[in-house]
Structures are given as structure tokens and as C-alpha cells.
Amino acid sequence: MHVHELIIYPIKSCAGIKVKEALMTKYGLAVPSNPRIFDRRWMIVKNGRHQTIRVLPRMTLIQPVVVENGLSLQAPNMPDLHISVNPLPKEVLECTCWDAPILGLRYGDNVSQWLRTFFETEDELDLVVFDDEKFEGRATKDADVPNIARDGDVVAYHDMSPLHICSLQSLSDLNTRLEKKIEIYNFRPNVVATGLSKPFDEDYWREIEIGDVKLNWIAPCTRCLLPTVDPKTGIKDPNSEPYKTLRSYRLKKDPYGASSLFGIDLVSTDESRNITGTMHVNDPIRVLKDDPDFWEKK
């Protein structure tokens, strides 16, 4: 088994950036040449409340590009927009992410106007960035989904965990059941794994090693309607696929209820360091601990 792709999503729900190597930090994958650019460090908010492609599916058409001292945002029929990472904005905005309070630094009115123009709305949209040196992250263990996170496990603007893994073998199994095939990017993984002996082997991983990074499983990834959005077009599937098909064979109602499972969420084994190591495309994935009885347990 090995890493097929590594993907960093600097802005929550916007397009990802494929990289050949990535640093693993307490807040997820970071760009080695500029560790200030890390996964889900930015998010778009409406009146302070986080926005996702569940509500604004065209968010997936906003492509961040790493440039000197920050990001360049590119989107159809829009001028490129530079987002600075040094210095950061000064204005502190009180935000919520999944109803949990969290702070953000608000970029200027020109950024807000760019967002309103792209989304063709007059809503109060802002782009905020997480200041990891001053702000407190959201506790992973407080997420609505049952998980085994530790007290010190935190995230910035992620849904729950700093790292998400999906496998190509599981995707292939799903695609045999779908009339219209989808790509792994619908699921927004950070690590795309391949070479598994059978589909959904990742369900059982509890501690793994990639490169010099050790990772602990905290939960399976419970799926909502987000993967029904085609990341290439920003259009939701009219038949709510793959949501419907996943619910037909990937439910573990105790304790995960009516949400299907696809992929796994993990944290760094070493919670004492901000940067815990480096992983690369083609790195082997070594399973150090597993739980072969996961699907039988209640």
C-alpha cells in the first residue's frame, strides 16, 4: 500500500492543491515551502457563519494557487485575487464553524466584493484566516460524530479531524454500483491511498505510518450530501449520488446513525509538536495497529 496523491485544501470547501510532499502539522497538511499555508486555514463566512459547498456548490470552482507570500485565488470569469499570509489581516471576526465559536482574521472589503461578484449575491460574505499563534482551535472530541480524539487534538476550520484518507480501491467498489462514475475528489481526501488488498480495508486501520509520520484513527468519515457536488462543475447530482448508494451498503447505525461511512479521519500520534514529520507521494503506508472486528462491534 502506498500514497497515490496528497491534497491540501487551504480554503474550506474550495478546490485542493496537489503536492508531491507535505508537512504534517497539528492542524493538518502544510506546504513545505511555506508552512503558513496549511489545510483549512481559511474559510468563507456569511455573517460570521462558515459556508460550504453543501450550500454554495460553486465554492469548489475557486482554485487557490501557492504564490510568493500567500495564495492567488482563481475562478471562472474572475480576476486573480492575491491573499497575503504575511502580514495577516488585523480585524478579528467572531465566527462559528458547525455552531462552535472560533475566531478569524477578516480580509478587506475588496476580497468580500470579489466573493459577492463570483457568487452573484449581495450577502455579507467574508474570507477569514485562522491565526494559529493566537487563536484556540476547536476541540476534535467535541464534534457531533462519535470519535476517540484526545483532549489536545484540535482543528482550525476542518469539520472534525486534521487528516482524511480515502482509498482508490474503495472508490472502485463504489463505482461498480453507480450509473455515473465519480472521482475520489468528490470526497475531498488529504491522502489518497492505493494498493489495498480489498476495498474498505482502511476501515480497520487504527495506527499507521506514512513517511516519518505516525497517525492515530479517531473515527470513520460519516458522509453527508457534500460528495454529491461534482468538483469540476460545482453542480449537485440530481439523483443525490453517491449519497443514496453509500447509504444502501455502508451504514453502521450503532454508533454512527443514518450516515454512511467512506474513508477515515486521523490525528498525529505525537500531539506535543506542531510539525510531526513529512509525507510524500509513493510513500508506503504501514499499518501498525488494526481493529479487524470493527464492523461486528456495537
Image (tube, helix red, strand yellow):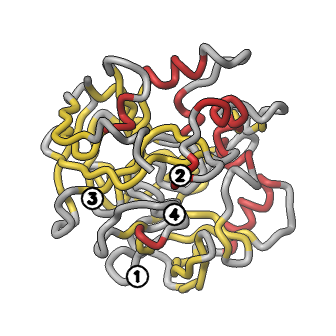
| Residue wearing tag 1 | 135
Quick one: label 2, few (<14), some, or many (20+) residues within 10 Å? few
Q: Which residue is mark 2?
A: 254
Amino acid on which the number 1 mark rests in the picture: Phe
- Badges 1 and 2: C-beta atoms under 8 Å apart? no
Type of amino acid under label 2: Asp
Q: Which residue is mark 4?
A: 42
Residue 226: x %, y % from top left: 66, 45
The answer for how far apart the CA atoms under marks 4 and 2 are is 34 Å
Look at the image and tell me whether residue 161 can be seen: yes
- Mark 4 or 2: in front is 2
* 197, 73: nearer the viewer: 197
Label 4 element class: strand
Assign a secondary structure to mark 2. helix
Q: Residues within 10 Å of mark 4 (few under 14, many from 20)?
A: many
Contact, mark 3 vs mark 2 (Cβ under 8 Å): no
